[in-house]
Amino acid sequence: MEAALTIHRLQFAFTVTFHYLFPQLTMGLALLLLLLKTLALRPGGKRYNRGVRFWSRIFAISFALGVVTGIPMEFQFGANWAEFSKAAGGVIGQTLAMEGVYSFFLESIFLGLLLLGEKRLGPKGHWFAVFMVFLGSWLSGYLIIATDAWMQHPIGYAVGPNGEFILASIWSLLLNTWVLWQYAHNMIGAVITGCFVMAAIGAFYVLNGKHESSGRIFLRVAVSVGVVASILQLYPTGDRQGKLIARYQPVTLAAMEGLFITQQGAPLTILGQPDMARRRLDNPLIVPGALSWLTYRRWSAEVKGLDRFPMENWPDQIPLLYYSYHIMVGLGTIFIAVMLIAAWKLWRGTLYRSRPMLWLLMLSLPFPFIANTAGWVTAEVGRQPWLLYGLMRTQAGVSQQVSGGNVWFSFLGFLGLYTVLFLLFLFLVWLEIKRGPEPLEAAGRLTV
């Protein structure tokens, strides 16, 4: 049973992780597209329309791949996690259905108008199409996060006659305390991803000397938004999300921080390796008292360690949780530093001539994807061993009729298919980058 459960979780984790590469890009680009289109409405702002057209095409490629990779996830709820679907479908089915019916169709319909209707709609009508794409994308994110937030912090439900969970309040589901800060944290992470992708391609154009005027626009917009988003990711959204974990999932907080022993004035661990056999951190680099202050705003506050909780309630993979959390926080800190330096150079007017900074922005492109993935691993591994925190254990949600061999077979199929799709995505995006946002013969006559 344990081996079958591991394979079920591995397959679902792989499909979720791979799928999320695309929505995090589309949600981040949606805001940047709206900003570019708004700038294009200003007097003399027509040059921004080239960026809108360019990034709309990349948005469409990412959106299409997100749809294709998201479909298998929906089937897995019924195929591999049937017991969970029977128990919780009456609640999470509400938000998942709303995401498909409302946000997906809203986004897809207006995406067509965004791509094909610029001349017919006119400037303001085209801006409205961009806004509706943004609204649909961010509404989709909200409904998905609301689903996950209910699994993290179940409220607004009743128990039916057969032990199933029934939705008692749609507003409790949609306005769950957990969803508000998790959504803000997630969407700002998506914006950071969009900013680094836009800045990387802008830096590529400036370094390459082709489409340089558009590259400067991309850099200016991406860095201006990215520096704000990177700071907001740390505070207040990351801070408030951490406080929710401390309040409702204290065992998760202890595992994330590698805190094996309850302490007053608990230290914040910067580096270290969890030793599960000896229940300690090896080679720790700590900031004394900082964890107590960050969690409770008191340097001497007591923070519960893993020793205060039964072992059966510990997260199943504490080293994975610990490292994922520290990767997320470490990269987030680096993003703040990179964007602050880039913003300072932009303000001074030296960014476009600073080749080391341009190279740094270009080479930073994959790291927001890694940070966001590490964040999701932290959230989902941290919730274990619960599918519904405090209500339903993970092993209780697995389909009883699906063998581990069947899951392995489908997992290998997904692995091959998703590899082909990822290579296709890279190829199509590279074609768009080579094509560029404007004809090369016009690029030299445009100034920023």
Image (cartoon, helix red, strand yellow):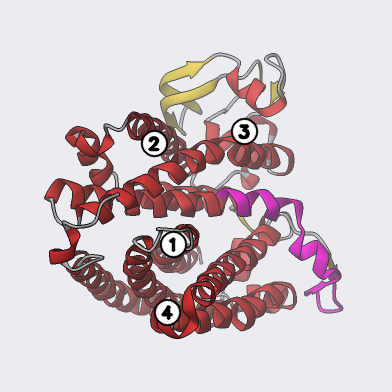
Q: Position of residue 290 (x, y in %)?
A: 59, 19
* Residue that mark 3 sits on: 306
- Separation of residues labelled 2 and 4 (CA atoms): 33 Å
Q: Is label 2 in a helix, a strand or a loop?
A: helix
In primary-sequence order, the first of circles 4 and 3 is 4
Residue 118 marker = 4
For the residues bearing labels 3 and 2, Cβ distance under 8 angstroms: no
* Residue that mark 2 sits on: 339
Q: Is residue 443 left or right of 280 when viewed as pictured? A: left
What's the amino acid at mark 3?
A: Leu
Q: Residue at x 12, y 50 (%)?
A: 208
Q: Residue at x 23, y 44 (%)?
A: 363
Q: Is residue 391 left or right of 442 when viewed as pictured? A: right
Residue 40 marker = 1
Residue 353 marker = none
What's the amino acid at mark 1?
A: Ala
